[in-house]
Image: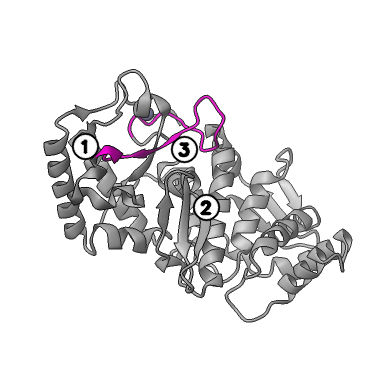
Amino acid sequence: MNFIDHNPSLETYWRSIILLGRNVASYKFSLAKTLLEIPKNKTEIILEDLALPFALNICDHLKTNDKQHTGPSNKFLSFCREYNKNQVNDNELKKHSIKHGFTYVLDAFHNVAGGEVPRFFENVKNSNRGIILTDNFYKLFEGEQEKNLNLEVNSRWKLWETAISLKINPNLVEINSDLQNEVLYIFNDKNRRIDVTSSRDGLNGYQKGKCFYCQRNIQIEKGYENSCDVDHFFPHRLKSSSEFLNINQVWNLVLSCKECNRGTLGKFDKIPEIIFVENLNKRNNYYIESHHPLRETILNQTGRTINDRKIFLNKFYKDAVNKIPAKWKPKEIFRDNS
Ligand SMILES: [Zn+2]
């Protein structure tokens, strides 16, 4: 078993809540999104202030995906649907959200894999019910990852709701990649394509806003100076040979800074050095072991056991170097720049 961090950072804990939590409803996603979006100038947030943005995030998702709960029916969600039909107003939605929206989510938010991660808020249960944001919560934003964290919550939420609306276990979704449009998609039971999420958002969960190769901070969203590229680890050019057929699949896609991908001394069509092959193997194993929605996809693409996947990557590396005998590593690796 591989572990991603020996000393998990706060970001890792936050991500584990979003990526690893088992969800019967989408409330955890909505709460995470709400916490990222609300003004952070005071540590105590009463339910009165949390309730409306929390409910509105759910209303928003209901508009594109009516399934937000794995059970048959749910009072709070019915109310949110009525809001979307203009049958209830903001104030009524808020009241209902205070009463029914937070029944489990505040207590369960920090539960991951049968344990509890360091808390990002304390749950206050006196007459003025609400939460108190902890230092951990504020420290999360010191790495300027707010926007990336928000995109990630959305991405995971979309994967989750798509899977449950198709009655597929979210851990079993077979995800395909449309490279041109940088979109991950699945086929539904009628074999129709459904776009799930931008591949950038989907892949960032592991890389934590860092370039796969040089560890420089990257932005997931397009249009910034340090916006990332979706990079083929083994170059796309190999595709012309039959032994490299599944090169366009998620197992071979990473997020890279522009300098590494195509800058001076960039990678272009070269093959990354063996250390990065090991990192790719670690990344793919992480997706599998963490029950990430990409799990089943990567199992199918690269092998069912740790050993199979190692053999697969080793062979791919050997064949790739025989085809393109030019290895590459980044000019510099940026450590501790979080
Ligand atoms: Zn880089």
Q: Are marks 3 and 1 in contact (CB under 8 Å)?
A: no
Going from the N terminus, do you reach mark 3 or mark 2 first? 2
Residue 4 percent across, percent down from the top left: 34, 47
Question: Mark 2 belongs to which amino acid?
Answer: Thr
Judge from the rendering whether residue 309 lies leftward or rightward of residue 175; answer left or right.
left
Q: Vertical placement of 100 versus 50: above or below?
A: below
User: Foreground residue, 243 or 262?
Assistant: 243
Which type of secondary structure does the marked residue at label 1 adopt? helix
Q: Which residue is mark 2?
A: 197
Question: Mark 3 belongs to which amino acid?
Answer: Gly
Tell me which corner region of the image, top left, top right, bottom left or bottom right, holds residue 146.
top right
Residue at horizontal 27 percent and vertical 38 percent from the top: 237
| Label drawn at residue 275 | 1
Task: Judge whether residue 81 can be spotted in this image.
Answer: yes
Tell me which corner region of the image, top left, top right, bottom left or bottom right, holds residue 210.
top left
Q: Vertical placement of 259 versus 115: above or below?
A: above
Q: Vertical placement of 6 versus 82: above or below?
A: above
Going from the N terminus, do you reach mark 1 or mark 2 first? 2
Residue 108 percent across, percent down from the top left: 57, 65
User: Foreground residue, 133 or 257?
Assistant: 257
Judge from the rendering whether residue 40 lies leftward or rightward of residue 190; answer left or right.
right
Instruction: Give ligand 1's quarter of the image.
Output: top left
In this rendering, the label closer to the viewer, 1 or 2: 2
- Within-10-Å neighbours for mark 2: few <14, some 14–19, many 20+: many
In the image, is residue 214 part of the stretch drawn in magenta?
yes
Q: What stretch of residues is rendered in magenta?
A: 213-237
Residue at horizontal 47 percent and vertical 67 percent from the top: 170
Question: Mark 1 belongs to which amino acid?
Answer: Ile
Residue 238 percent across, percent down from the top left: 23, 41
